[in-house]
Image (cartoon, grey):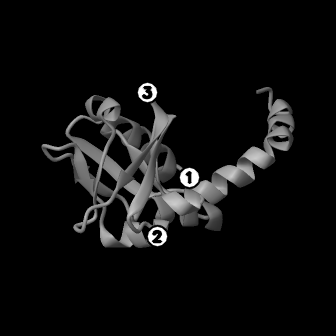
Amino acid sequence: MFLGEYKHNLDAKGRIAMPAKFRNKLGGTAIVTRGLDRCLFVFTAADWEALAQKLIALPLAQANSRAFTRLMLAGATEAELDGQGRILLPDHLRQYAGLKKEAIVAGLYNRVEIWDAAGWSVYKKKTESASDEIAEKLSELGI
């Protein structure tokens, strides 16, 4: 499982180091795609395959299904971890997430998210200030 929040810098080539704790779980290859809230999602190959199977099973006739499937699948890329545990983030994904130099790598159990550090800070403050509301809504779902 992926847990924790780590600050890393992108290098001039667009590579970012995965935290040492995440490297074994990712294996040699990670799948990186557009995430929600303007971040990137990073999956293991097995978790990606499970998600992709669910996405391709969505009804083609529904516009939202097509749009979400395109968001997740069309921009996805395989990223090999190099000898230093870095992955290369393609230009289109860096632009989507607004990644510049400083980034946050956050573990969310079955996936990793990569955020621009400034965007993460704004998102985190907003979410933390609404934590009571969020918790109340989630309690309606049985959580």
Q: Is residue 110 above or below residue 99?
A: above
Q: Is residue 46 above or below residue 59?
A: above
Disc 2 residue type (three-letter)? Tyr
Q: Which residue is mark 1?
A: 58
Q: Secondary structure at mark 2?
A: helix
Q: Earlier in the sequence, mark 3 or mark 2?
A: 3
C-alpha separation, residue under disc 1 versus residue under disc 3: 27 Å
Q: Earlier in the sequence, mark 1 or mark 2?
A: 1
Crowd rating for badge 3 (residues with CA inside 10 Å; few <14, some 14–19, many 20+): few
Q: Secondary structure at mark 1?
A: loop
- Where residue 109 sits in the image (x, y, percent)? 50, 31
Q: Nearer the viewer, mark 1 or mark 2?
A: 2
C-alpha separation, residue under disc 3 versus residue under disc 2: 26 Å
- Where residue 48 sits in the image (x, y, percent)? 39, 43
Are the residues tagged 1 and 2 within 8 Å (C-beta)?
A: no
Q: Which residue is mark 3?
A: 1
Left or right: residue 60 compared with residue 134:
left
At 43% from the left and 27% from the top, the residue drawn is 1
Disc 3 residue type (three-letter)? Met
Residue 90 showing in the rendered view: yes
Q: How many marks?
A: 3
Q: Which residue is mark 2?
A: 96
